[in-house]
Amino acid sequence: MSITEQQLGNGQPATTSKSDVMTLRDVTVHYPVKEGVLQRVTGAVRAVDGVDLSIPRGQTLGLVGESGCGKTTLGRVIAGLVPATGGDIWFDLDETAKAQMERLRSVPEKSMSAEDKTIWSHLEANHRLGSMTRERQRVYRRNCQFVFQDAFASLNPRQLVRDIVGRPLRVYHEASGEDLDLKVINLLERVGLGPQHLLRYPHQFSGGQRQRISIARALALNPEFVVLDEPTSALDVSVQAQILNLLVELQEDLGLTYLFITHDLGVVQHMSDYLAVMYLGRIAEIGPTAEVFHDPLHPYTKVLRDSNPSLEGDELDHSAHLRLTGTVPNPIDPPQGCRLHPRCPVSTSECGWQVDDMFLSLETSTPASFEAISRVERSSPFAAQLVMDDDVAALELFTEIQNSRSPFGGAVENIELDGANVSIRLREVEEIPLIPVAPGRMSSCLLAGRPDGIRPPAESR
Amino acid sequence: MTMTSENVTISSESQHPRKLRSRASSVRWARRREVMREVLRNPLTVIGVVIITLFLLMAAMAPLLTEANQPDPYQSPRDWANIDAAPGVEGHVLGTDSTGGDVLYGIIWGSRLSLQLSLTVVISTLIIGTFVGSVAAMRGGRIDNFLMRVVDVFLAIPELIFALAIAAILGPSFRNIILALAVVFWVKYARIIRGEIIRVKQTDYVAAARVVGDSTWNVYRKDVLPNAVTPLVVQATLDMGNVVLIGAALSYIGLAQAGLTEWGAMVSAGQSGILAGQWWVSTFAGVAILLWALAFNLVGDGLRDALDPKTEGR
């Protein structure tokens, strides 16, 4: 069943079935980087870079990742606050519509049959953000709400609570006058506040109360789906628990769908049915929360889990913990292949090693030969010609790379020595897609589907 | 759950919706009074307010304080029997000028001209500046670029010189001084409001209003403008003084009609007598200008301190 304005007008909850509230296909958000007086575009910050995601109705999808991985941007894109620069965002697809979308998505419109063309234009007009009809856009706007991380910043300091919470109702002419006041009081009571709070300004409340107000505002239109952007990260732990319990309670009562964005693994474990782990603008792994925690299928997930301090003591075997090396790469120029490979503790030769990774490795392992490189001519991220200071240094580097036992050594497809020149070609690896590895579980790690799994190559348990 | 602040308590019977509407407006007024109290905590601001009030009273009661000159009350009545009379001479408390014009009369009626000048200029430039700045900031892109380059051109020329040039082209009259100042002063407001709107547009509460699906006009009216006007109010208050200062400078160099009871023109008229020891005309008119500009600057600074976003909204 899809939602119609009429159903909502009657205040009935939309029928729940196995369908997605939101479906993302290859969504990107690139912010142009401009340079110089003429403001020429010289590159792009790839905040979100090719995300496929489905948010199932009535469930909570947790979205975790470290700061700067693009999780907030992704949430804002889904809520329509930031336009996507690529890909499609679909709203309210039932199973049939989703199947049609998947089938026709990759077909160019020219080669569609007449019937398919009708189906496709129907899909575009009713379900796709950016091409929806005005009416459908209203339905989407009403059904998709957002709760901000900083509640205080999301409340207009010059409006009374009554006007803040009542505003959505006014916009859609749902209520006015006394009726509006009564509805606002109902909403406030629903989130644990009362009529005495109606005529106060946001600065007169505590942090937890402010977040309650913004939750009340988000619920005013009886939406189906709420994006929660770190709703508790600015709060004390005790208040955090209250807000989380409130959210769970509201979800049970109202059949809400949540996208819960957070960096707090403890919270996400408590809140979400499904978990998506994000790294550098892409989804690393996705699956049912308990399974993802118990048996991560991506080394990044494993690192995140293992770095999470636990109050229960040493139930996990610390010696098997994975650690990342280095820092997060620049999202303007993310690594080829698997985005994690330069930092990954279990990387193999197939992970997408580039010439630049090799330099990094050489700089630490053999600084002398690294110093001796006088010029580099790159022909692609995977191939380059190195001009060395002299023939001896070139020979040293040549043998060094040939005998290298690090993962990038295995990625060398061809290396030639010609006097002081060393030309090298590494294995070219495409961006690794999110692939299904187990029922309901997807991972973008090459090792996830293999018998040994994502363990450090040398050791086995 | 504990409450955090000294809230306006609402008695239980006032929770009835019918009474909420009036309660809401009284809560809003209570908030405004609170801000006013904050503003008036600074003694210097209070001094400014007192001086302004006195000037306003003077302007309002001009016909009661003195007998209005016919046909034009903004020309001093000439007492040809008492030319260059020193202060204290019978009937001329502050003396007369070289054409027998009474200085006190000039100062009293001059306050009306100053008020007219500053109010007309500030209100009209506020409207124009807010409009231009808002369009630039809300639309952005090329429109913003174009409007701001126009503003840059205006800002590149010093206020006084620019106003002087325009007034000189238009010809000497008080109305043309007002016009010239209006042309010069709007750019500042456009610049200020544009910057503020761009800042406010990036806040979460504007994003929240957009998630709800409210129209751009409503977002501008309810969220953007109310949170962007504070620096504009401060600047407008300061300019109430500045306008009179520059207006006086223009009439001092002869861009107002001769004999007008404008303070700047009076300073100019009294100047020739200073060397002969007739200090009173220029001095009293000059003091009037000084007090006017000082008072508005004191209040403007007080407003700035009290309404500063960093201290606001505790």
Image (cartoon, coloured by chain):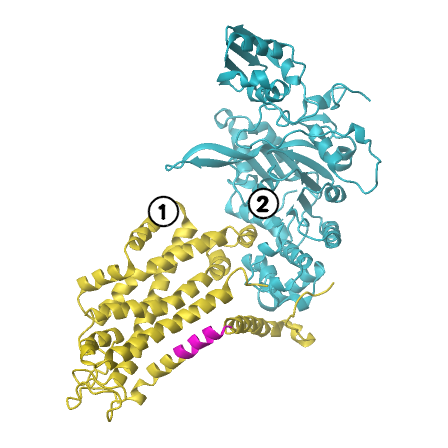
Q: Amino acid at mark 1?
A: Asn
**Residue A248 versus residue B265: which sits nearer the camera?**
B265
Quadrant the C terminus of chain B occupies: bottom right
Residue B53 or residue A16, whichever sits in front = B53
Residue A265 picture quarter: top right
Q: Which chain is cyan?
A: A
Task: Give the vertical position of A394 relative to A23 (above or below).
Answer: above
Q: Which residues lie in the magenta part?
A: B42-52
**Residue A251 colored in magenta in the image:** no
Q: Colour of chain B?
A: yellow
Binning the other alpha carbons within 10 Å of mark 2 as few (below 14), some (14 to 19) or many (20 upward) gives: many
- Label 1 marks a residue whose chain is B
Reading the image, the residue beneath label 1 is: B145
| Left or right of residue A208, residue A172 in this image | left
Tell me: residue A223, above or below residue A187: above
Mark 1 against mark 2, which lies toward the viewer?
Answer: 1
Left or right of residue A209, residue A363 in this image: left
Residue nearest the observer in this picture, A152 or A173: A152
- How far across and down, in percent of the image, does residue A383 sit? 53, 15
Q: Name the residue tied to disc 2.
A: A79
Corner quadrant of residue B132: bottom left
Q: Provide residue B302's location: percent of width, then percent of height.
A: 46, 69
